[in-house]
Image (spheres, rainbow, N blue to C red):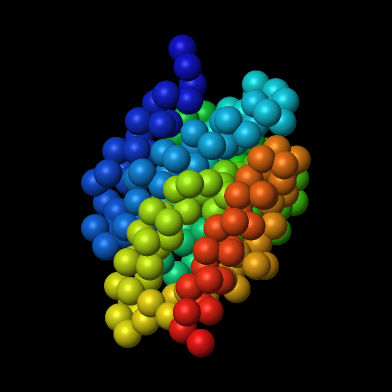
Amino acid sequence: MDKFLPIYNKVISNLEQNLPSWLHYHCLEHTIYVLEKAIYIAKKENVGEHDLFLLKIAALYHDIGFIINRENHEELSCIIATKELKEFGLKKKEIKQICEIMKATEIPQNPTSHLAAILADADLEYLGTDLFEEWGERLFKEVKHYWPDLSRDKWNEIQYNFISEHHYHTCYCKQNRGPKKLKNLQLVKDRLKQIK
């Protein structure tokens, strides 16, 4: 019996039913994307089976706090995960490790372990892909919900500063997502030049 499947079903159903509709970026699709990327990067980084199990759970729960509140959602995600994972029979030590991995998605990212570094990279992997524009647009739409007068120009500036300061943590993403991320950064830079 796959121990992961019942956890997956519970979390996905919770996100489906309870995430606010204005979350265009931190939506169910984002969680599934991060989970897939975490698995993919973990395999490239030769992560063992049990560690992969913990990583997959951390990826699933990393944004569940949004069902309660956008503010300090990382902390809320850990509270929800702790409560639910006890019911699934996970050990205290494992739950603590899962929360520590999840914490790595907080901005600015500061992963404290290899697994945390993988989740941090999976969370922002899109910055170094062709999906950058699509997910960036979703994020703009979401941010505008609680910052209605955010202009496109101001958004480009925020994006530029964010990507400039971001760096990948895993060898895989540094090598395979870093170059494209620089190209995406240039796209944003070119837009800023048009303003000036």
Where residue 156 appears, as percent x and y from the top left, is 47, 74
User: Where is 119 relative to 57, above or below?
Assistant: below
Taking the spot 48% from the left edge, 46% from the top edge, the residue there is: 130
| Residue 101 showing in the rendered view | no
Taking the spot 65% from the left edge, 67% from the top edge, the residue there is: 164
Counting labels gives 0
Q: Image quadrant of residue 49? A: top right
Where residue 62 appears, as percent x and y from the top left, is 50, 49
Q: Nearer the viewer, residue 121 or 15?
A: 121
User: Where is 143 relative to 60, above or below?
Assistant: below
Q: Nearer the viewer, residue 20 or 157?
A: 157
Q: Image quadrant of residue 166? A: bottom right
Taking the spot 37% from the left edge, 81% from the top edge, the residue there is: 151
- Determine the residue located farthest toward the top in the rendered image: 1
Relative placement, left or right, of 91 versus 196 is: right
Where residue 189 appears, as percent x and y from the top left, is 56, 71
| Residue 189 showing in the rendered view | yes
